[in-house]
């Protein structure tokens, strides 16, 4: 009887051990799942914050946003846009590089067409005012170039490329409100498309 009882007791211990092991495994399986949910929530929070700080079509330029032009003069973007009625801002990654030169020259060659439609044109990059001056003089550009080294406007426009770059883009404002947003385009599509978009806005 003692042996049988001992054997039964042993079986009880052995049967209990897998159950405990199973319970532990189940607990471990739940923990990573919870971690994944938290990570997904954090990712969504970051995306929501980014979207909230990005200018989209229908948004107005922040009233306190100011940048320097090639002459080191401070320019209030909202005032410039409202005074211009229609403002075309084209972004280029780096002054005097081949693609950026084609883009800038394209806007230069279409400058009279755009101004004839009542639009004002400015170029924008993170280059210094001095670099912008050299670019403007060398290519005989008819419009101002704005300097945004801290990406105060480039970032909100959604054209900041990590870690320090800029996505070639153009934006058209009417009375200070963003009407056309085109991020990630070729130099040629930038100036030809801008002409077409301005025509749509003013006709």
Image (tube, grey):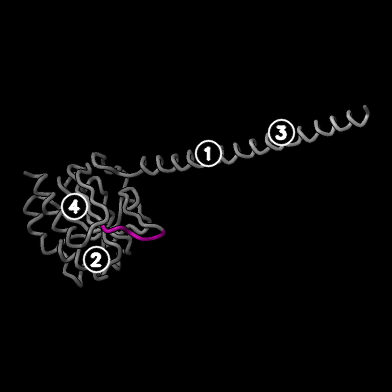
N-terminal of the pair, mark 2 or mark 3, is 3
Q: Is residue 164 magenta?
A: yes
Secondary structure of the residue carrying tag 3 is: helix
Q: What residue occupies the far bottom of the structure in this picture?
A: 138
Secondary structure of the residue carrying tag 2 is: helix
Residue lying at 33% horizontally and 44% vertically, measured from the top left: 54
Please give the range of residues in magenta: 163-168
Q: Is residue 49 magenta?
A: no
N-terminal of the pair, mark 4 or mark 1, is 1
Secondary structure of the residue carrying tag 1 is: helix
Q: Nearer the viewer, residue 35 or 55?
A: 35
N-terminal of the pair, mark 4 or mark 2, is 4
Residue linked to disc 2:
100
Number of the front mark, 3 or 1: 3
- State the mark number for residue 88: 4
Residue linked to disc 1:
38
């Amino acid at each position: 009887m003692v042996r049988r009882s001992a054997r039964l007791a042993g079986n009880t211990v052995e049967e209990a051990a897998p159950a405990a092991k199973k319970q532990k495994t189940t607990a471990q399986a739940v923990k990573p799942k919870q971690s994944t949910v938290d990570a997904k929530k954090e990712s969504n929070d970051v995306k929501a914050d980014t979207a909230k700080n990005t200018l989209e079509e229908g948004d107005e330029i922040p009233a306190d946003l100011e940048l320097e032009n090639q002459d080191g003069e401070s320019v209030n973007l909202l005032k410039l846009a409202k005074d211009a009625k229609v403002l075309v801002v084209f972004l280029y990654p780096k002054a005097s590089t081949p693609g950026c030169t084609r883009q800038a020259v394209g806007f230069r060659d279409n400058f009279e067409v755009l101004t004839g439609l009542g639009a004002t044109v400015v170029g924008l990059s993170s280059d210094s005012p001095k670099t912008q001056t050299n670019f403007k003089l060398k290519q005989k550009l008819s419009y101002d170039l704005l300097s945004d080294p801290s990406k105060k406007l480039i970032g909100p426009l959604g054209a900041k490329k990590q870690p320090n770059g800029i996505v070639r883009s153009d934006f058209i404002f009417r009375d200070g409100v963003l009407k056309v947003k085109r991020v990630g385009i070729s130099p040629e599509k930038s100036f030809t498309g801008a002409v077409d978009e301005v025509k749509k806005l003013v006709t």
